Amino acid sequence: MTGFASRRGAAGRYSWTWDLRSVNGRGLDLRLRLPDWIEGLEAAVRTRLQKAMHRGSVQLSLRVYSETGPAATALDPERLAAVMRLVERTEAEAAAADLGLRPSSAAEILGLRGVLDAPSPEEEDSAALRKALEADLEPLIADFTAMRASEGAALEATIGGHLDEVARLHQAATEAAAERGARAGDVLRAQIERVMEATDAVEPERLAQELALIAVKSDITEELDRLAAHVDAARALLAAEGPKGRKLDFLVQEFNREANTLCSKSGSRALTAVGLDLKAAIDQMREQIQNVE
């Protein structure tokens, strides 16, 4: 099931943006793009997402920004001492060579690389930031779930319409099978009479066996009964709470199996036409079920 949600947050000198989206998928495929310097964040996020969804190709990205200020800087005494010695030596050698140098300012010395550095995120304790991010993840998932729920309601209505069409075609197949049975009896009796007039070598018992076999092979009562049961089961699944996509996916395969058998046993143009319409309706329903959580 498709879905999208984004969110911005901030805590302390950090700010961040979330981006969560999903597309259809048979299983749950999580792809996370998270800062690797926040220890334990990926495992916590993955666990939370697995509880919130069960199907789909899901992508989550997080960008963290740091606003470095004066409090975040640190002075390296050893590096400063080394720089000061180099400045003193340079000025002394310049004076010996009769070269005039402008005196160095404190700002210039502090601006030299390594003298005054801001600590990297990896050097900081990321526990507080991780806690803030995990808390901010909850409303993001809530927005994402709400969007998917809205799409799910629309899908339920669409699949319900396909089930109504399957039920209608089931009734049409039942009526076509009854008409076929009435005509088939007359045709079969006429064919038997011609055979009996042409030869008297057919044993009555063998003829009865063959007729019974033909009747069994052409009977679609069981297929129609199972098809009706599948419609009821699908409606019950749609009304149930919780994940239902995998169950519906399996059930639609049973729908298709009954439709294929019905077509193979049809024995009449009318019943074959109904069977083909039934297969088309089931295929349309299958495409929509692929989107269901």
Image (cartoon, rainbow, N blue to C red):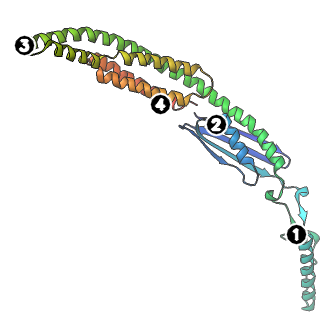
Query: In the displayed image of the protein, which residue is found farthest to the bottom?
Result: 97
Residue located beneath label 4 in the image: 287
Query: In the displayed image of the protein, which residue is found farthest to the left?
Result: 198
Place of residue 119 in the rendered image (x, y in percent of width and height, measured from the top left)? 84, 60
Alpha carbons under labels 4 and 3: distance apart: 57 Å
The amino acid beneath tag 1 is: Val
Q: Is residue 220 left or right of residue 201?
A: right
Alpha carbons under labels 2 and 1: distance apart: 46 Å
Q: Is residue 70 above or below residue 40?
A: below
Alpha carbons under labels 4 and 1: distance apart: 64 Å
If you read the primary sequence from the N terminus, does the residue marked by circle 1 or circle 3 appear first?
Answer: 1
Place of residue 200 in the rendered image (x, y in percent of width and height, measured from the top left)? 7, 13
Q: Is residue 39 above or below residue 44?
A: below
If you read the primary sequence from the N terminus, does the residue marked by circle 4 or circle 1 appear first?
Answer: 1
Front tag of 2 and 4: 4
Residue located beneath label 1 in the image: 115
The amino acid beneath tag 2 is: Phe
Front tag of 4 and 1: 4
Residue located beneath label 3 in the image: 200
Place of residue 7 in the rendered image (x, y in percent of width and height, measured from the top left)? 73, 39
Q: Residue at x 36, y 21 (%)?
A: 277
Tell me if mark 1 has few (under 14), some (14-19) or many (20+) residues whose alpha carbon lies within 10 angstroms of its own: some
Q: Is residue 33 above or below residue 232?
A: below
Q: Nearer the viewer, residue 212 or 29?
A: 212
Query: Which mark is drawn over residue 4?
Result: 2
Alpha carbons under labels 2 and 4: distance apart: 21 Å
Q: Residue at x 77, y 39 (%)?
A: 136
Q: Secondary structure at mark 4?
A: helix
Q: Nearer the viewer, residue 216 or 8?
A: 216
